[in-house]
Amino acid sequence: MKMEKTGQAEIHINDQTLVCPVYEGTEGEKAVDVSRLRKETGLITYDPGFGNTGSCASDITFIDGEKGILRYRGYDVADLAARCEFIEVAYLLVHGSLPTLAQRENYATLLNSHSMIHEDMREFFSNYPEHSHPMAILSAMAVSLSSFYPELRGDLKEDVDMTVARLISKLRTIAAFSYKKSIGEPAVYPRHDLKYCENFLNMMFSSPVRGEPINPVMADALNKLLIIHADHEQNCSTSVVRAVGSSGINLYASIAAGICALWGPKHGGANQHVIEMLEDIRREGGDVDKVLERAKNPRSPFRLIGFGHRVYKSYDPRAKIAKELCKKVIAATHTKDPLMDIAQELEEKALADSYFQERNLYPNVDFYTGLTYREMGIPTNMFTVMFAIGRLPGWIAQWLEMQNDSDARIARPRQIYTGPNLRKVAPIAKRK
Ligand code: SDX
């Protein structure tokens, strides 16, 4: 990790001065190293939600939120989405460079050879209640993989490659199986002759008795959607994967925790909630202005789902790609989705509204991806699962990077205690 000391900053506390190194990354991002602050002054930093905290240095993903730039290992996300297969991007994130043709073929073979899940694991699906959320099943299955498959030993490259392949290949199978379970159909097994995205669509939409032709527009859309989700530096779920991994636990358990974090409606779960919000608007007569007023009301907990971002203060580059994909899929299916019209009206009016302008609130990745998945025939409660399949290589790459980072320590923030001072326990009969 190329982080250079380029200066120093002074922190003055009463008559004490602490000189802290200033580090700079390869894109000019600067950070003050406050790691000696508590030891030397007794003070800690207070930064709720870690908005100003650099928890690590990383070679993987660069975001410029002001300019709307997103790059994986130096490649622009739009360039990758236009030219690569998802498994190439997975390889890039995990290995650091794009694969050659031979390396991509070997990787595809490796993934195919690990696409099945243990038959005993398949039995698990039958024991979940019918309306279980697929994210609950996905996280439980991810951690269960650690019981069925040997743990990764970080010192052996083959072990690392195999564990990574298992996760990337098997979680896709698990996702499709959980959908089949939810509609009461038998699972469709993965096929060695299909590519990663085609294989997923086949497992989702074919049945053991009837093959369903795979629409190349859908396969291409899925490929691009997975690529735009593949990593996003230290977001909530990735920070969770790193935090859980920092305790020394295995990759499967760390990924399961990341899946749970992603499920939240303020994070990846927003792609499902966008559709629910658009459906509510349609049911209530299509009054977009009413929804915008609710979102702007500081006394209402409601926020415009799919809008706003901690890092992007301009249009999320992924939302641009997703919007175009959505239009392409709609054209290919010859449908007219009224929710797309509502979404576009909502976007137009929000971007023209001073509340959203002053706060730099733009559509984020989740605004148009849900609509695209919907057009592809993927059910709403599977949208966040799709996000998780895409994000998996990023989580893995970040976890592996942390394992090799000599500065990494167990994640353990401090706090400012604001509860009662010391008090005595009264006998139970005397307590009020
Ligand atoms: C993802 O971090 C990542 O990288 C995540 C992600 C990834 O790839 O991993 O990009 C994926 O999680 C996308 C975000 C999905 N979530 C949503 O779409 C839910 C709706 N969005 C908001 O809840 C919100 O914008 C967040 C959670 C995304 C960000 O929260 P922040 O950083 O705490 O918001 P902020 O401090 O920048 O907000 C500033 C102001 C506040 O108003 P004031 O107190 O200044 O008056 O903007 C307001 C907020 O109330 N605001 C919104 C709003 N988002 C922020 N007002 C109305 N609608 C919104 N959506």
Image: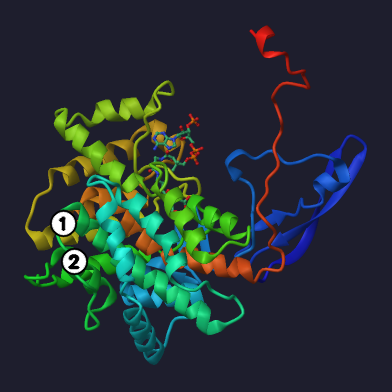
Within 10 Å of the Cα at label 1, are there few (<14), some (14-19), or many (20+) other Cα atoms? few
- Which residue lies at the image location 25% right of the left edge and 56% below the top edge? 126
The Cα–Cα distance between marks 1 and 2, rounded to whole angstroms, is 10 Å
Q: Looking at the picture, which amino acid does disc 1 mark?
A: Gly
Number of the label disc, if any, that sits on residue 296: none
Task: Tell me the quarter of the image containing the C terminus.
Answer: top right
- Which residue lies at the image location 81% right of the left edge and 45% below the top edge? 38
- Which residue lies at the image location 46% right of the left edge and 37% below the top edge? 359
Label 1: which residue?
377
Q: Using the rendered image of the protein, determine whether residue 369 is visible from the camera's viewpoint.
A: no
Ligand 1's image quarter is top left
Label 2: which residue?
218
Q: Quadrant of residue 47?
A: top right
Q: Looking at the picture, which amino acid does disc 2 mark?
A: Met
Of residue 15 and residue 204, the one placed in the foreground of this image is: 204
In this view, the residue farthest toward the bottom is 102
Q: Are marks 1 and 2 in contact (CB under 8 Å)?
A: yes
- Which residue lies at the image location 28% right of the left edge and 57% below the top edge? 125
Within 10 Å of the Cα at label 2, are there few (<14), some (14-19), or many (20+) other Cα atoms? many
Q: Secondary structure at mark 1?
A: loop
Residue 74: percent from the left, percent from the top? 50, 72
Q: Is disc 1's CB within 8 Å of ligand 1?
A: no
Give the vertical position of 417 relative to 243 (above or below): above
Left or right, 139 with respect to 132, comes to: right
Residue 320: percent from the left, percent from the top? 32, 56
Task: Tell me the quarter of the image containing the N terminus.
Answer: bottom right
Comparing labels 1 and 2, the label whose residue is closer to the camera? 1
Of residue 285 and residue 289, the one placed in the foreground of this image is: 285
Of residue 85 and residue 67, the one placed in the foreground of this image is: 85
Residue 198: percent from the left, percent from the top? 22, 73
